[in-house]
Image (cartoon, rainbow, N blue to C red):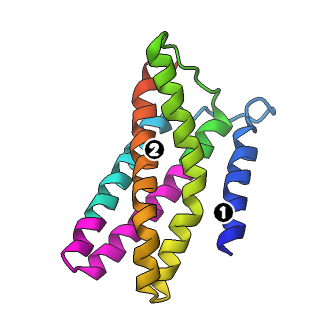
Amino acid sequence: MITALSVIIPVAVAALFGVNLRKLGFDVQPLTFLPPIYATINGITAVLLIAAVVAIKKGNKKLHEQLNTTAIACSLLFLLMYIGYHMTSDSTSFGGEGLIKYVYYFILITHIILSIVVIPFVLTTYMRAKLGNFPAHKKIAKRTFPLWLYVAVTGVIVYLMIAPYYV
């Protein structure tokens, strides 16, 4: 199931990313208000992940579980908003020049690649905890946490860098 979801989610997002309802003739308003909201959700996800690590280090397993479950919910909410935005709005091009352009594209590309890579890590880490296999959970969580945190933080950075170029 984890393998299937790890393939289906990025393929579905890529497919839906290429669908623009307005260009297909549907009378929908562009959801241009969504980018700052889903960037904020990425920021909240990062805070939740850090708080979850703090909670488990303090021995609070219940809070750790709640924070991680909420982080997963935030990631799903982000994904739905991201798809909604791109299905109703034209893509925005980055307008920076020089070194900042290369920095932006490096962050964007690593963000996209790791957002795909992290899916099976998150699902496996979560399921190992749910199934009570805590040694295996802890082992993979040491890899999942930095990847997921990077994706969450770079999502905010990408938004902040491209925000001046939204029409």
**Residue 124: image location, x then y, percent:** 55, 73
Going by the image, does 85 lie left or right of 51? right
Farthest residue, direction bottom: 132
**Frontmost residue, 146 versus 32:** 146
The stretch in magenta equals: 52-79
**Residue 74: image location, x then y, percent:** 44, 58
Going by the image, does 48 lie left or right of 75? left
Helix, strand or loop for disc 2: helix
**What is the spatial separation of the Cα atoms under label 1 and label 2, in whole angstroms?**
21 Å
| Residue 57 is covered by the magenta coloring | yes
**Residue 45: image location, x then y, percent:** 38, 55
**Residue 122: image location, x then y, percent:** 51, 66
> Which residue is labeled 2 in the image?
38
Mark sitting on residue 6: 1
| Image quadrant in which you'd find residue 161 | top left
Farthest residue, direction right: 24
Of the two numbered discs 1 and 2 in the rendering, the one whose residue sits closer to the viewer: 1
